[in-house]
Image: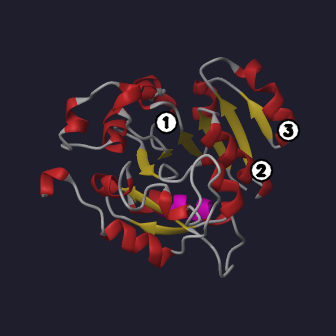
Amino acid sequence: MTTIGLIGSGHIGSAIARLAVAAGHEVVLSNSRGPETLADLVAELGPNARAATAQEAAAAGEIVVVTVPFTAYRQVPVEPLRGKVVTDTNNYYHERDGHIPELDDESTTVSELLQEHLPESHVVKAFNNINFAHIPPLARPTGSPDRSALPIAGDDTAAKGQVTVLLDSLGFDVVDAGPLAEGWRFQRDTPAYGMVYVTPGTTYPDWTAEPAPAAVVEDALAAATRSRDV
C-alpha cells in the first residue's frame, strides 16, 4: 500500500483517486478551494481517503500527483516535495493558459518547467494523454489481454520505476518514452494524445474508450513530429 498525495482533485485527480483506493492505496486529496470542499469525494472514497491542504498532501504522499491547471504550477509547494516522486498530468493549452513563448517555440516542455520549479524532486510525466472519462473504464488487472498502456517520461530511472509499479496497480501497463524532454511525444495534438484510447467512429462528447496496448502506444509515440523538426 502506498500513500498518494494529490495536488488537485478535479476530473483527472478524482479518477486516479478512485482507482488508487480500489487498489488498496491511501489517498490524501487537496485542491485550491480548501479541504472542506472535498467532503463529498472523501465520503465516496471511504476510510482510505482524507482531505488536506496542498502542503499537507505533498508532505503525506510517498508519490504525489500534480494535476492542476498548468498556469498554477508555480503554486505547487516545493519544500515538502524535496526528494519525492512527482507525477505530472499537466498539458499546455494556450487558449486557456495564454501564450508561453518557451512552449510555443518548443524549446522546453510542460513537465520540464515543473521540474525546474521542483529542482530536488523527481518529476515523471503521466496521465496527461488520456481523457479523464476513459481512465476508469480502461483500467484492467495485471495480465489482462485487453490492458491499455500509458506513456511516461522522466529523467530519473528509479522514479519511473516507482510510477510504473503504481500505474500497474491502478490497472495500466507503461511505455517509457524516455527523458522529460521527450514528453512532447504525447502532448496535445500528437498521435498518442487522447484519440489513441477512443473507439473508432465515436466522437466527443459521446466517445467511448478503446483499449490501447503497448505496441499501439509505441507506434503513436514514434509517429509524433514537432514543427521545429520539420
Q: Are marks 3 and 1 in contact (CB under 8 Å)?
A: no
Q: Say which amino acid is labelled 1.
A: Leu
Q: Whole-Å distance between the Cαs marked 3 and 1?
A: 27 Å
Judge from the rendering whether residue 227 lies leftward or rightward of residue 33; answer left or right: left
Along the viewing direction, whichever of 51 and 9 lies nearer the viewer: 9
First in residue order: circle 2 vs circle 1: 2
Residue count near mark 2 (Cα–Cα under 10 Å), binned few <14, some 14–19, many ≥20 = many
Tell me, for residue 44, which label it has, or none: 3
In the picture, measured across the screen, residue 197 lies left or right of residue 114, that is right
| Picture disc at residue 21 | 2
Along the viewing direction, whichever of 31 and 210 lies nearer the viewer? 210
Type of amino acid at the residue the image marks with label 2: Val
In the image, residue 17 above or below residue 200: above
The residue segment tinted magenta is: 161-167
Q: Nearer the viewer, mark 2 or mark 1?
A: 2
The answer to whether residue 155 is visible is: no
How would you classify the magenta stretch by its main secondary structure?
helix
Q: Is 66 above or below relative to 224?
A: above
Marks 3 and 1, the one that precedes in the sequence: 3
Q: Nearer the viewer, residue 10 or 179?
A: 10
Query: Disc 2 to disc 3, how far (Cα)?
Result: 10 Å
Disc 1 on helix, strand or loop? helix
Image x and y of residue 183, in percent? 34, 54
Tell whether position 107 is magenta: no
User: Where does residue 168 sit, x and y in percent of width and height?
Assistant: 62, 66
Kindly state the secondary structure of the residue where label 3 is placed: helix
Q: Which residue is mark 1?
A: 81
Amino acid bearing label 3 = Glu
**Looking at the image, residue 181 lies above or below residue 52:** below
**Residue 46: % across, % down:** 87, 41
